[in-house]
Amino acid sequence: MPAQVGRPVYVRAATRIGVVHFGPGAFHRAHQAAYFDDLLAIDPDWAICAVSLHNPGVRDALQPQDGLYTLALLEETVRLRVVGAIREVLCAPQQRKAVMARLVDPQVRLVTLTITEKGYCLSGDGLDAAHPDIARDLVSPEQPISAIGWLVAGLRERRARRLSPYTVLSCDNLADNGGRLRRAVLDYARRIDRGLAAWIESEVSFPRSMVDSITPATDDALRTRVASALGVADAWPVQREPYSQWVVEDDFRHGRPPLERVGVVFSGEIAGYDRAKLRLLNGPHSALAYLGSLLGLDTVARAMRDPALAGFVERLMREDIVPTLALPAGFDAQAYVDAILSRFRNPAIRHLLSQIAWDGSQKIPVRLLGTIADALAAGHDIDRLCLPVAGWLHFVARQARSGEALVDPLQAPLLEAGRRATGDAAHDVETFLRLQPVFGALAGDARFVEALRGAYATLAPGDAAAVALALAAAQGPQP
Ligand code: CS2
């Protein structure tokens, strides 16, 4: 490889697998695996066994190349680096024994997850025991298919063998990710073995974490760039912005990787970081995705070049979202907003709005509805905050009308509600609000219902002209 391409600076064969990771999608490989790659140069005990829960795609791409892959850091001059942290890559349904062998390996002290919001099988704040994967796993817990099922099966086996447990670290964009995962794991464990549940409750830690780095899906431009720079084809390179942050709650009972030596922040104020990131980055991202798509725009950077949309999102961040946050000591919210806005504008990144629009039913509650609930509780106005939520409803209705795909675990009920939309705000909003797992208690709050109806009406019929007018109106006079 050319000298300017970064590569592992440690002897891979001398590393040992200390981490099992569920969900080795682009985000894990671009973010956590890069931190572990840096760490392996200091401590050889933390190589990764990456486990896909469903599809063999990642394994089939990475195994023939020994788990190596290229990471592109997107800025004016793109930097390439080959990451070596993944030493083994498995596909759980096809390699059950190998996965279990890793989960009970005493050398493995950490299990991490990036399985996206829907992978947790949650309903409201707890486990969705009626979720088909969970219902199946509860019947045959020794042959799990869900992430929760695997975590508990591994812990059960460790307890039977009198081994100490692994720490479970969620790296997904969920508020209180560790706390919610812990409650779901305990609920599941109680349904199969109360003694096991009590052991997990007293022995296993589930630190919370906040992860951040904008990671557009792999595209042909990246594949071509990597092939020409390396002189070899990489079956699945990944890309991200240069910025990256990982804040982890320091709650590890049986040893932890010294990740602070490679830039990870261990903090006791994780909830503050977590909220700031979900609400100030992911919330506006979703706002850009839905409103931008309705405007006919394709990428985040392009949406940020639309002055009305960019102005709306900035005002949403500074005037509506920041006041709802309880920030960690010394956290400069305005500087954080400035940095996010310039990250969104990064011209070297082609981040498709359609990618961010996926899984709205899972993302909207953690990204926008929590802010709305807090703003209502504080007696603040929620009109602007309701606009992106209404944008999502119009987006769903548009997909339903045009027969286009909607990537969402609630795709069927969403498309059904979208097909029934008539354009009448009262009728359509009422139809969508019946999606209980999305709106929860807010659906019964008259102030929310009224504001959402108003926002929906201003965006109707959901075409570019109506959205442009609504955005102009939402700017309003500065206070
Ligand atoms: C994005 C996130 O796809 C999405 O929904 O909002 O993946 C976002 O890019 C990351 O959370 C940034 O850390």
Image: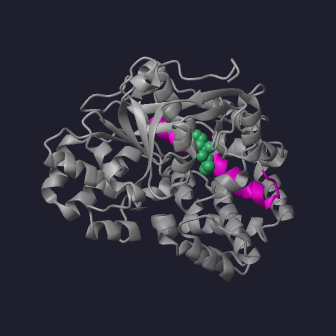
Q: State whether residue 456 is above or below residue 79.
A: below
254 or 463: nearer the viewer: 254
Which of the 4 quarters of the picture holds residue 291?
bottom right
Magenta span: 272-298
Residue 171's spot in the image, x, y percent? 45, 42
Dividing the image into four quarters, tell me where ligand 1 lies: top right
Of residue 472 and residue 124, the one placed in the foreground of this image is 124
Q: How is the image coloured?
A: one colour
Does residue 280 belong to the magenta stretch? yes
**Quadrant, the N terminus:** top right
At horizontal 63% and vertical 30% (from top left) the residue drawn is 334
State left or right for residue 214 relative to residue 75.
Answer: left
Q: Is residue 77 left or right of residue 90?
A: right
Residue 112 in sight here: yes
Residue at 77% across, 70% down: 460
Up-down relation of residue 460 to residue 473 (above or below): below
Q: Total number of numbered labels? A: 0
Residue 290 is covered by the magenta coloring: yes
Question: In the rendering, at what x and y percent does residue 143 appear?
Answer: 30, 62
Q: Nearer the viewer, residue 287 or 76?
A: 76
